[in-house]
């Protein structure tokens, strides 16, 4: 984004790219949207994109590629072993993340699988700022447990705390002392803490965590899937790093971690992932699992074309005009929502705007999934697909009792350089209408509940005939408008 000031005084995020390849979108009528969400079991993951106007489900695999990335894909070296494409990827990891050894994996959760199987013993505790769904699933799968150690105010949704992703150092020390060092597998820090609204941690906090890790001899693992954005917010919000380049900040972050892993679907391309380390003994501990689960060590389940795109994308992560585009659009959307009194997570984070579904749908009990209901209702009245990040995305305990989520969010992702400002204005307009008509939204209940990661493919139904009432009011207010 440029730092251009507008004569009008308006704060408008101005793009420093142009659109050269486009995809046609369809906004289907509300009657079709009603059928589509019913067919999808009121779960936006199960919608077919032919029925979706703006796909704000995620930024995973959906960021726009640059011309240089696409060009690089034509130079891929098709080889099972020893592909030149892999060495370009490895070099980019060394240059950008300053880690010498790279284990390629097909996506982020595959890294979590390899790391969990290698380092976690049953009963181990993994202290972290906050979990991510797939990280938690893999930790539980091998018998580990998590300890989430955010500061108490991190879950206050409307706040001015610039670094809600920070670990509370006192809680970290207490957790280690109480559980015993021998029962801690590693400390996990997630850049731009996804599930609490894409909230960053500060460099000062990461340095403090490193000190504790050193003091107790515990490994520090960094989930770097959203490292570029976290680095950008450190530059924006942390005085000591204002004059540094994104590259300097990213290197300072990865230098503090013993192991860095990422989903390249978010970080730099549309597929792939990686585990990056400097210590050869850690590399050897994990190495054997790559051919077993992923593929040979020079492709790890990623196509060579994608590997080329990852390598270029990693280098482009250092470009502030590229990295800032999504956070700037998010800031714009969040600020406008906030001005209208629509409850949204503040300060603006990364990845997307996060609507506070708990406040938006105060009348819906948490056991009837307010965030899921809001995601379904919003799709119905706008064709915009967001993602539930609340109790549906949570799990049941060992007795089968539902663990209610700490916060209920509707995430509206803004993948990099994909949407225009007029589309963002449409998102805002329809959300404003829905807020004014929020009493019409009702709850949901499961009709099909998968045992693991239920939010992906779970099926639900409305607890009353509220979707029809919403359609009726929409038609009254908008006539034959889509
Ligand atoms: N870690 C973080 C912080 C993530 O956000 C994700 C994925 C993963 C790990 C797993 O990576 O999908 O490549 O296997 N986040 C996506 C999202 C799914 O929509 O937020 P993956």
Image: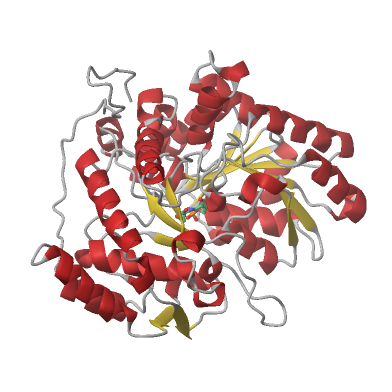
State the image coordinates of residue 208 (x, y, percent, origin top left): 76, 31
- Toward the top, the furthest residue is 243
Of residues 440 and 169, the one drawn nearer to the viewer in this rendering: 440
Q: Quadrant of residue 460?
A: bottom left
Q: Quadrant of residue 252?
A: top right
Task: Locate the C terminus by quadrant.
Answer: bottom left
Horizontal side of 65 relative to 342 (left or right) equals: left
State the image coordinates of residue 178 (x, y, percent, origin top left): 91, 53
Q: Residue at x 75, y 42 (%)?
A: 168
- Say if 293 sits above or below 97 in the image: below
State the image coordinates of residue 273 (x, y, percent, origin top left): 49, 47
Of residues 325 and 100, the one drawn nearer to the viewer in this rendering: 325
Horizontal side of 265 relative to 417 (left or right) equals: right
Of residues 450 and 445, the one drawn nearer to the viewer in this rendering: 445
State the image coordinates of residue 461 (x, y, percent, origin top left): 39, 83
- Say if 432 sits above or below 266 in the image: below
Q: Residue at x 82, y 65 (%)?
A: 123
Q: Residue at x 30, y 70 (%)?
A: 47
Q: Residue at x 71, y 42 (%)?
A: 167
Horizontal side of 90 relative to 462 (left or right) equals: right
Q: How many marks?
A: 0
Task: Locate the N terminus by quadrant.
Answer: top left
Q: Is residue 49 visible?
A: yes
Of residues 414 and 117, the one drawn nearer to the viewer in this rendering: 414
Q: Is residue 45 visible?
A: no
- Toward the left, the furthest residue is 480
Q: How is the image coloured?
A: secondary structure
């Amino acid at each position: 984004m440029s730092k251009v000031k507008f004569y009008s005084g308006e704060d408008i995020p101005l793009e420093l790219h142009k659109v050269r390849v486009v995809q046609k979108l369809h906004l289907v009528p509300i009657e079709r949207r009603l059928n589509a969400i019913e067919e999808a079991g009121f779960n936006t993951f199960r919608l077919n994109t032919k029925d979706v106007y703006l796909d704000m489900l995620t930024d995973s695999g959906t960021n726009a590629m640059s011309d240089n990335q696409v060009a690089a894909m034509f130079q891929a070296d098709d080889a099972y072993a020893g592909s030149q494409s892999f060495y370009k990827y490895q070099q980019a990891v060394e240059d950008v993340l300053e880690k010498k050894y790279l284990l390629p994996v097909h996506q982020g959760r595959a890294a979590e699988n390899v790391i969990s199987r290698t380092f976690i013993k049953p009963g181990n505790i993994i202290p972290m700022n906050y979990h991510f769904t797939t990280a938690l699933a893999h930790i539980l799968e091998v018998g580990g447990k998590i300890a989430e150690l955010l500061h108490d105010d991190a879950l206050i949704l409307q706040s001015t705390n610039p670094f809600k992703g920070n670990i509370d150092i006192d809680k970290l020390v207490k957790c280690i002392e109480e559980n015993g060092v021998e029962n801690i597998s590693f400390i996990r820090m997630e850049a731009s803490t996804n599930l609490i609204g894409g909230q960053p941690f500060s460099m000062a906090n990461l340095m403090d965590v490193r000190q504790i890790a050193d003091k107790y001899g515990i490994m520090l693992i960094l989930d770097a899937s959203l490292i570029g954005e976290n680095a950008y917010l450190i530059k924006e919000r942390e005085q000591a790093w204002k004059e540094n380049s994104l590259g300097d900040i990213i290197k300072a972050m990865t230098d503090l971690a013993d192991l860095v892993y990422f989903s390249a679907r978010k970080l730099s391309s549309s597929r792939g992932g990686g585990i990056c380390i400097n210590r050869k003994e850690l590399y050897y501990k994990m190495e054997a699992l790559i051919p077993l689960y992923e593929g040979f060590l020079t492709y790890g389940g990623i196509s060579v074309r994608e590997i080329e795109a990852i390598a270029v994308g990693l280098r482009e992560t250092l470009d502030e005009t590229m990295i800032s585009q999504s956070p700037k659009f998010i800031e714009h959307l969040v600020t406008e929502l906030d001005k209208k009194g629509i409850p949204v997570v503040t300060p603006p984070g990364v990845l997307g705007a996060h609507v506070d579904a708990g406040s938006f749908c105060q009348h819906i009990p948490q056991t009837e999934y307010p965030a899921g209901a809001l995601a379904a209702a919003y799709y119905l009245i706008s064709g915009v697909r967001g993602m539930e990040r609340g109790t549906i995305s949570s799990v049941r305990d060992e007795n089968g009792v539902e663990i209610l989520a700490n916060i209920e969010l509707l995430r509206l992702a803004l993948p990099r350089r994909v949407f225009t400002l007029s589309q963002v204005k449409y998102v805002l307009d329809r959300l404003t209408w829905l807020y004014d008509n929020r009493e019409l939204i009702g709850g949901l209940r499961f009709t099909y509940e998968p045992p693991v990661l239920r939010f992906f493919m779970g099926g639900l139904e409305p607890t009353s005939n509220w979707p029809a009432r919403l359609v009726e009011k929409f038609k009254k207010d908008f006539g034959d408008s889509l």
